[in-house]
Image (tube, rainbow, N blue to C red):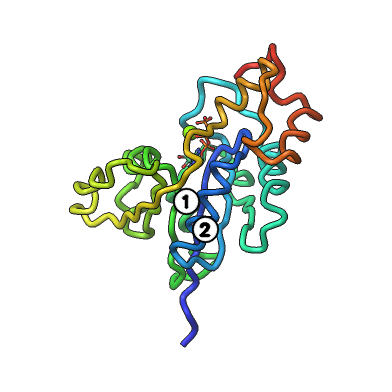
Amino acid sequence: MRKKLRLGIMGGTFDPIHYGHLVTAEEALVQFNLDKVVFMPTGVPVRKTHRSVSSAEHRYLMTVIATASNPDFEVSRLEIDRPGPTYTVDTIHALRDLYGTEAELYFITGADAVWDILTWKDSDAIADACAFIAATRPGYDLGRFAEERQRGIRIETMEVPALAISSSDIRARFGERRPVRYLLPESVSAYVEKYALYSPDGAL
Ligand code: ATP
Ligand code: MG
């Protein structure tokens, strides 16, 4: 019998993608023995409406540039090519069509994002269809998911060292001309400069 495909899905705005995302994906790949990690830039984010988000094409290309050297990382256009707001439940259906019903889907997120997802539309369907890998800071209380686990939601946790990095901080740094080196790949930061994505007078 063919081995079931174990697929990690790393969804995000990726505005811009940074080493926090990349370290987390690589750690999940190895710790959970995944066959690959699919990065999934979101289409029109339903939640981040308070600021202007860079175009889907810019976010997609930054994600491609950042992951290009890793043979186990892929980038999917599923969400950015789908018109209208992004719902994870639609993405899961599309992934099942692509990879078959047998594939095991692991959603890789920051620990806080798990609670977000569980308040989304059709969260029960999401929880039935896939497991979560929640990245936490070293020393963070892993008992926090006890209630979710009791509800039958499969949540694995994993400690990653680069959790303090965030896209919003990086955007602010670009805007204020503070250093961004070592927070994200240089190729991505060159891309940001080339298209002046986070210029000082632009919205953060
Ligand atoms: P923003 O600051 O705009 O919220 P972000 O840095 O959180 O951006 P997102 O694109 O929103 O980046 O995050 C995508 C996913 O990556 C989410 O599941 C989020 O929890 C997770 N994530 C974000 N930053 C880190 C990090 N430093 N380490 C591990 N996971 C992260
Ligand atoms: Mg975030």
Left or right placement of residue 119 versus residue 11 in this view: left
Q: Secondary structure at mark 2?
A: helix
Identity of the residue furthest to the bottom in this view:
1
Distance in Å between CA atoms under marks 2 and 1: 6 Å
The residue that disc 2 covers is: 94
Position above or below: 150 against 177 = below
Name the residue: 53% across, 32% down. Answer: 166
- Of residues 135 and 13, the one nearer the viewer is 135
The image shows residue 90 at horizontal and vertical percentages of 47, 51
The image shows residue 40 at horizontal and vertical percentages of 57, 49
At label 2, counting other C-alpha atoms closer than 10 Å, the crowd grade (few under 14, some 14-19, many 20 or more) is some
Left or right placement of residue 175 versus residue 143 in this view: right
Q: How many marks?
A: 2
- Of residues 75 and 137, the one nearer the viewer is 137
Tag 1: amino acid: Asp
The residue that disc 1 covers is: 90
Name the residue: 63% across, 21% down. Answer: 173
